[in-house]
Image (cartoon, rainbow, N blue to C red):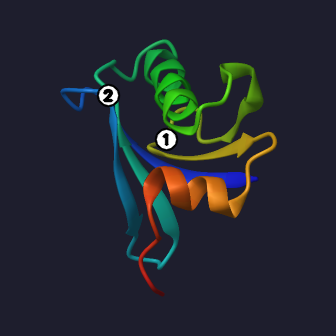
Amino acid sequence: MLIAVRVTPRGGRDGVDGWIRDDAGRLLLRVRVAAPAAEGQANASLIAVLAKALGRPKSAFALLSGQTARVKRIEVEGLSEADLTQAFGEPPPT
């Protein structure tokens, strides 16, 4: 399953803030990480935060796009819509 994520590096703490819709109407999961956006540190922290929240190993995650951007596409092996809803709640309506 693919997840679109908006990451805030140096966000003060590691954690998931929930679902948002951007100005274009795209559904994004908003995540903060304490790590800086340097040398892949924020990306590694993002994967760790998501793995912990979803109860999956880090090896189940693949960063498909957005390596240097705030909005990233992440593929999670073996994840269902129900798993996402259970971990992060219902997404906002369109």
Q: Is residue 41 left or right of residue 54?
A: left
> 92 above or below 37?
below
- Please say if 94 is above or below 27: below
Q: Is residue 69 rendered to the left or right of residue 13?
A: right
In the rendered image, residue 66, in percent from the top left (x then y), is placed at 59, 41
Please give the residue where the numbered disc 1 appears in the rendered image.
Answer: 69
Residue extending furthest toward the right: 78
State the image coordinates of residue 70 (x, y, percent, origin top left): 44, 43
Is 78 or 10 nearer to us in this picture? 78
What residue sits right under mark 2 in the picture?
14
Q: Disc 1 residue type? A: Ala
Residue at (59% x, 32% y) in the render: 55
Q: Under tag 1, what secondary structure? A: loop
Instruction: Kindly identify the residue that appears in the image at 28 percent across and 22 percent down.
Output: 34
Would you call the spot at circle 2 few (<14 residues within 10 Å), some (14-19), or many (20 or more)? Answer: some
Q: Earlier along the polypeptide chain: callout 2 or callout 1?
A: 2
Q: Residue at x 34, y 28 (%)?
A: 33
The relative height of residue 16 versus residue 33 in the rendered view (above or below) is below
Q: Residue at the location (54% across, 61% down)?
A: 85
Depth-wise, is mark 2 or mark 1 nearer the camera? 2
Q: Residues within 10 Å of mark 1 (few under 14, many from 20)?
A: few
Mark-to-mark CA distance, 2 and 1 = 18 Å
Task: Check the image and name the residue furthest to the left.
Answer: 12
Quadrant in the picture for residue 93: bottom left
Residue 8 circle label: none
Q: Nearer the viewer, residue 38 or 84?
A: 84
Q: SS at mark 2?
A: loop
* Callout 2 amino acid: Asp
Residue 9 appears at what percent x and percent y? 32, 30
